[in-house]
Image (cartoon, grey):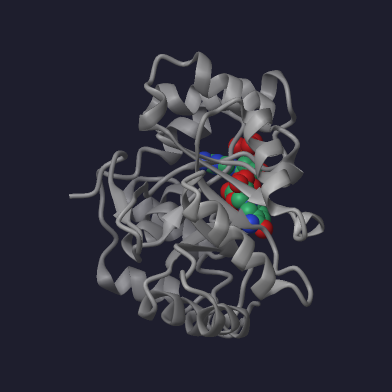
Amino acid sequence: MLTLSSTLSLNNGTRMPRLGLGVWQIPEGDPAYRAVQWALDAGYRHIDTARIYRNEQSVGAAVRDHSVARDEVWITTKLFPVDALRVGHAFEASRARLGLDIIDLYLVHFPPPGLVVSTWKRMERLYHEGRVRAIGVSNHGISQLEAIRKSCSILPQVNQIHLSPYHCNWELISYCQDHGIAVEAYSPLTRGKHLDDRRLQDIAESYHVSPAQVLIRWALQHDFIVIPKSSQESHIGTNADVFGFTLDDSVMHELDAYGSTKRTL
Ligand SMILES: NC(=O)c1ccc[n+]([C@@H]2O[C@H](COP(=O)([O-])OP(=O)(O)OC[C@H]3O[C@@H](n4cnc5c(N)ncnc54)[C@H](OP(=O)(O)O)[C@@H]3O)[C@@H](O)[C@H]2O)c1
């Protein structure tokens, strides 16, 4: 049975929490600090940040100040493509801002043009040096993953992609799942854009839950890792309250069809 502490086994055997808090656009300082503390209070054990979100310092402080043990919280941060030629330096700068001994997952945020393979080789070096528990990519399509697969020794452990019933690339998802690359869904709540879709609201009403809860549950039932963002305590709480219901197969299929005409990446 899925719970808030459920994890997914990555292709290196590391176990990553299935549900996390995304903190894009939550400002550094009190807003990010409070959001992370509320999430940890609510039982989240996974926070997704990035250098470019400019809130790593508050995220790290909130984790360090919370009573939950550091090794129970999974922290993801990301390499911005401008840093592709100095991966080790960018990684250490993120680690210093977070103020944490180890980062759990380091992702290449976007494919650096012309440098996909060489950047990945630098990521592999970090991993081999034991400075990070897992490495992965974000916004990488099949051609970029194939380039990595053909010339590198480690396959990404994760590909974090824009993913919800309204925005899916099933071909890319199948590729990742066939190659043991965990699929992580970002913008799983469609950045709020489709939460008032009548079809989604009808499904939510039939389960006595919110549209956001339906979207998070859909991702979990597909074995995606999912990182809804919220800066509000009430939303952070309800977004984690998705383990008391199961979407029927027919509803899963209905949701799967929402984005079937769209191809992304
Ligand atoms: N790798 C990448 O390139 C990439 C790109 C985008 C995002 N991400 C990651 O994915 C995370 C999530 O994606 P996202 O931030 O784009 O958007 P999202 O999670 O799809 O949606 C966030 C929006 O939904 C609202 N919301 C949250 N819970 C709600 C609820 N229960 N009811 C109604 N509205 C709710 C939030 O407002 P409130 O704050 O007011 O609750 C916010 O406006 C990011 O924070 C980031 O960590 C990664």
Q: Residue 220 appears in which quarter of the rendering?
A: bottom left
Task: In the displayed orientation, state which residue is furthest to the right.
Answer: 82
- Look at 42% across and 55% down and name the residue there: 225
When asked about the image quadrant of residue 144, the answer is: bottom right
Q: Where does the image place residue 223, in percent across and percent down from the top left?
A: 34, 63
Lateral position of residue 14 relative to residue 116, left or right: left
Q: Position of residue 167 (x, y in %)?
A: 58, 71
Query: What's the residue at 59%, 55% (across, down)?
Result: 107
Identify the residue shown where x is 40% and y is 14%: 67
Viewer-proximal residue among 156 and 163: 156
Judge left or right: residue 255 versus residue 27.
left
Name the quadrant containing residue 252.
Answer: bottom left
Q: 213 or 80: which is nearer to us?
A: 80
Instruction: Give the image location of residue 195, x and y in percent.
Output: 57, 54
Picture coordinates of residue 149 (x, y %)? 51, 80
Q: In the image, is 19 to the left or to the right of 2?
A: right
Q: Is residue 193 above or below residue 36?
A: below
User: Left of 255 or right of it: where is 194?
Assistant: right
